[in-house]
Amino acid sequence: IRNGIVNDIEVDFKQIIISATDQFYQMKKEYCKPMTEELFPFIPEGNLNTLMPVGWGNLKRIELIEINKDTNDPALWIDYIALDPDYTVDVTKVYDENGNTLDFTFNPTTKIIRVIELDEYGEVIEGESADVEGLPNNSIGEIIIHALVTNENIPYEVGLWDVDETQRYLDFCATLAFYFDGGSTKDLIEAVLKNDMAYLIQKNNGLLTLRQYGVEYDTHTIPSWLATKEPKKDFKDASKYYCSTAKILHNKFHALDSFQNIFLYDNEESTIFQKY
């Protein structure tokens, strides 16, 4: 039925549930790389070993990390990165702590951002955040596959993946502006999948695949009564899953951890309340 190592065991008076997993696919490795003196020889001690965030798509207001500063008095420039250089394509704007744009240069080879705008006293103004273009292959499926290839050494190929089935998902899955600042490969994949009702699964034949809820597949058809718990009357469960509105947050400013736009759909709220 399932090959692998025991990952979890649940026991009650009626049944024992044993969850198995393949050791190869636990995906516990830290995804983001630390900042080192080898990469950045003049990095401030406080930023040494800080994890470098990664990103895909067009990201707004990414927090800057200082890696070097002019030693003259007054200082005329400060160097920063916003993402791991391997994940940085371009930088379009840099902001100070008040949201004002600053003059800067961007080195497309080293991916270093140098802020050069001076205040009224001739001192360089510190950068706070930047608008950054991350990796371009930024669909949900492409991000997951990239993460497994680069950090878990799981290539996207026949024999490890159900390539035909996964391609079905890749053909229509959404693109993201995705930012990740630390955690395991599994954490990254779970964060990506929160943007869709989709799942990364290992089939009984051992192949990996990506599937979306509501789409019909040739295999793995499980009757709903086998996949759900016994029905019961429980007000806590009812209130937990009761939903009368939908709120969508978008256009995130990552350094501020805030969303600039909110879409609220509550047209059916009064009808649902009256009916149920």
Image: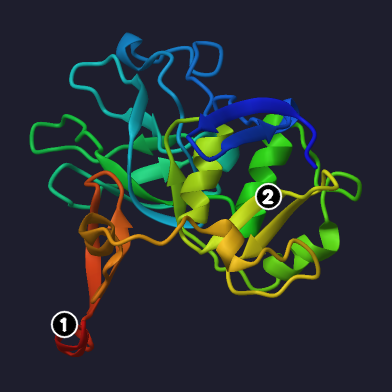
Q: Is residue 36 above or below residue 85?
A: above
> Image check: 79 left or right of 198?
left
Residue 114 image point, x, y percent: 38, 35
Residue 67 screen position, x and y as percent: 39, 22
- Element type where label 2 sits in the image: strand
Residue 203 or residue 189, whichever sits in front: 203
| Pick the front one: 244 or 140 | 244
Against 226, residue 121 (above or below) is above
Residue ID at (68%, 33%): 20
Local crowd size for mark 1, using a 10 Å CA cut-off: few (<14), some (14–19), many (≥20) = few
Furthest residue to the left? 120
Can the viewer see residue 138? no
- State the residue at coordinates (27%, 71%): 243
Q: Residue at x 59, y 74 (%)?
A: 214
Q: Can residue 3 be seen in this view?
A: yes
Picture coordinates of residue 271, whole percent (x, y): 19, 90
Q: Name the residue under label 2.
A: 201
Question: In this rendering, is residue 196 above or below 99?
Answer: below
Label 2 – label 1 distance at C-alpha: 37 Å
Which of the two discs, 2 and 1, labels the residue nearer the N terminus? 2
Residue labelled with disc 1: 273
- Left or right: 224 in relation to 113: right
* Local SS, label 1: helix
Residue depicted at x 57% and y 64%: 225
The quarter of the picture where the C terminus appears is bottom left
